[in-house]
Image (tube, grey):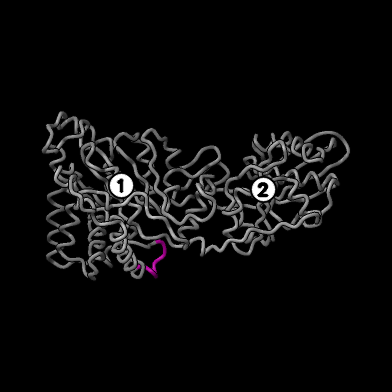
Amino acid sequence: MLVKVFGSAVFGVEATTITVEVNIDKGIGYHLVGLPDIAIKESSYRIAAALKNTGYFFPGKKITINMAPADLRKEGSAYDLTLAMGILVASGQIKTFDLDKYIIMGELSLDGGLQPIRGALPIAIKAKEEGFIGFFLPKQNAKEAAIVTGLNVYGVDSVQEVIDFLIGKTILEPLIIDTRAEFYKTLDFPEHDFSDVKGQESIKRCMEIAAAGGHNIILIGPPGSGKTMLAKRLPSILPPMTLREALETTKIHSVAGKLKEAGLMNQRPFRSPHHTISNVALVGGGSYPQPGEISMAHNGVLFLDELPEFKRDVLEVMRQPLEDREVTISRAKFTVTYPSSFMLVASMNPSPSGYFNDPGAPSSSSPNEMQRYLSKISGPLLDRIDIHIEVTPVPFEKLSETAKAESSFDIRVRVTQAREIQTLRFESIDAVNYNAQMSTKHIREYCKLNDTSLQLLKTAMERLNLSARAYDRILKVSRTIADLEGTFDVNSTHIAEAIQYRSLDREGWLG
């Protein structure tokens, strides 16, 4: 008897429906075809034990299973439940006429229970697009799949629950979630707040500008000056995510199987990988490509602490994603693309000793040693960072103050207002939502300078020997400063402040 049951495979952040054809005939054997990986080939052992412990049996006949399209690689244990249901119906142990109306996915335990899967959200989106009426999956993943409206999502604990529903023995109620209510639910106060930061007013100003325009930023200062503390507080002043951004971010974390809480993510991610990370773990990839840290930080912040400690080849692979805001991973038979629109926040010591240019401590590193230290970071990568800022230690007088500093909420109000100005400005332009995303064409249109501003920028370019990319960065940051002030034109004060945020371009850093 031939039976068709449907599952789904996830490539990148998109799902593809997989038709599982199960045919049982006279003879003995188990043949699984259609480019399954080892985990799928081992599924027969899990299925046999699960069926036996649920009161059914694994047929001792010739079982042929084809996973179509046959030229598409399938991987993972999430097809256990799909295959088990096909075998039960094809062997006549249960009778149902609705099997082709559902997507069925789940990893089986030996007792017939179900373990969570990856990519439930993109699978649910694809199931709705292709007209399936329901989706059976482990209960742990039901909440994220139920974000998709118009699809009946059944979270189940065991294969027995699926069988009982399909044969009409029981009725399962689909999980229904009000997506907008889930998105707009009251958010907790941020764990890290700028009100805890003593002093550092100029650094807070830089962080506000970076958040307002989505600019990449690098903090340079000695150990203990507060670089990490400031970076951790940046997400607290970023504008709230839109519903579209929340869905994009949730989809990526769903594919990676790293949703901390099931359901819709409504807070911007903050990722801080260790400096020993490999380039594959950072940008994504592998034999079966998975999103890397830069995609996990999509619509949020990627923090690279002690930037020169990262391997140079690891940092270099970020250059294209920083420009294109997406990562493309190519394999022999397929190509996947992961979105990676993130804010890069990096920190570093100014020298190997950490105290170069610190007036309160003698430097134990020579200019040559410092130059070698800085050379670990390539010029093209630094050019892609809009704001360079020096962080100096906070004096005792500031640390001992009892008054609270300005809160993240107050800063976030100004940042959100500046972002709203940018949203209106770019509403007719695809793929541009804030100033950091502007192309050269947009910079020329929205960052026009008067003669005074132009002469100031020319002088800075000549004295600091800045690249053309640095020129564009200064104009972008100037545009953001103007937006924070609510002014239409970019004037010389905005240009002057933006030039100050190119610390690593100054001659003083090289002695």
Which residue is labeled 1 in the image? Answer: 231
| Mark positioned earlier in the residue sequence (1 or 2) | 2
SS for dot 1: helix
> Closer to the camera, 284 or 235?
235
Q: Residue 165 location in percent, x, y?
A: 76, 54
> Closer to the camera, 257 or 298?
257
Q: Residue furthest front?
A: 402
Q: Which residue lies furthest to the right in this view?
A: 26
Q: The disc labelled 1 sits on which kind of residue?
A: Ala
* Quadrant that contains the C terminus: top left
Q: Main secondary structure of the magenta part?
A: loop
What span is in magenta? 426-431
Residue 213 at least partly seen: no
Rendering quarter of residue 413: bottom left
Q: Residue 279 location in percent, x, y?
A: 42, 37
The residue at the point 21 percent across, 69 percent down is 489
Which residue is labeled 2 in the image? Answer: 105
Q: Residue 356 location in percent, x, y?
A: 16, 35
Q: Distance between the residues labelled 1 and 2?
A: 40 Å
The residue at the point 31 percent across, 68 percent down is 421
